[in-house]
Amino acid sequence: MHADTYYNLSFTGSVAGTGTMDLNPTAGTITITLTNNTNLNGSSQSSDDNLIAGLLFNLNNKPTSAVTLTGTSGTLVNISASKSHSAIADPDTTDTIDHWGVSNNTTTGQICLEAAGSCAVGSQPDDLILTDETNYYVNPSVLNHDPSILGTGTFIIKIPGLNADSTVVSTDVSVIYGTSGSKEDVTVTPGTPPAATPEPASLLLVGSSLLGAAGALRRKMRPKLSC
């Protein structure tokens, strides 16, 4: 077993947001979260350029074969109208997140995670990540790519050849936004993985140990009776 390597992400520009990258050499995976914090209720209409469409990154060692996307999660919504400051995100319970795809460049080793472009699945770009707001002021380019992932999307990528010495090249990470393939630099900093929640069996074991220790202490402190 080897501890995960964890990173925090932040970016500003046409799209602003945060994220995390969790390298797990034991499982051979990287788990990526991307959160959109862009203001889509401003004084002028926002476009799909304000939606997150993907991430490009490199590891210090190239994957030994093709990477695969093994898991995605997030809440899907549709923008119901495009009116001045009154567009609303309606829950979409009939669709699934099925436009994100991955690939890796066999020459450079760059890994692409994307919902719009050559790495994506399907023809019409959907499932881009939309900021979580009460109201939106957006143009038809956002409506044309419904459904969107609301707030945060999570993606798990299987990376052949990932090992305990693998790291993300922090100076070579870019977020993709919109449907044109535009990108901007991401600031990458070391982070700390969230504390694991103990399993119920582990909690029971800890509780039993504490009770046993308390009983032993009481027996030790009990006064001895004189004969």
Image: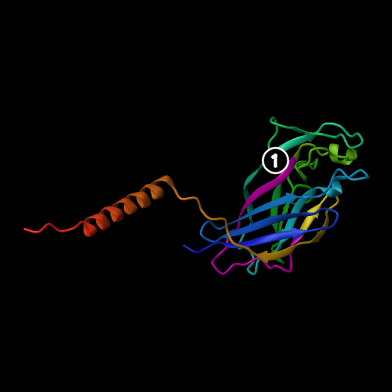
Residue toward you, 8 or 27: 8
Residue 111, position as x, y percentages in the image: 70, 59
Amino acid type of the residue tagged 1 in the rendering:
Asp
Residue toward you, 183 or 220: 220
Q: Which residue lies furthest to the front in this view?
A: 226
Residue toward you, 14 or 128: 14
Residue 197, position as x, y percentages in the image: 50, 50
Picture quadrant of residue 32: bottom right
Quick check: is 160 in the magenta stretch?
A: yes
Identify the residue at image location x=30%, y=54%. 214
Identify the residue at image location x=80%, y=40%. 124
Q: Is mark 1 on a helix, strand or loop?
A: loop
Identify the residue at image location x=89%, y=34%. 82
Residue 177, position as x, y percentages in the image: 81, 52
Residue toward you, 119 or 22: 22
Can residue 179 be seen at all in this image of the molecule? no
- Magenta-colored span: 149-174
| Number of dots carrying numbers | 1
Picture quadrant of residue 159: bottom right
Q: Give the left or right position of residue 24, taking residue 54 as reference.
A: left
Of the 4 image quadrants, the one containing the C terminus is bottom left
Quick check: is 186 in the magenta stretch?
A: no
Q: Name the residue under label 1.
A: 98
Q: Residue furthest left?
A: 227
Mark 1 nearby-residue class (10 Å; few <14, some 14–19, many ≥20): few
Residue 12, position as x, y percentages in the image: 81, 58
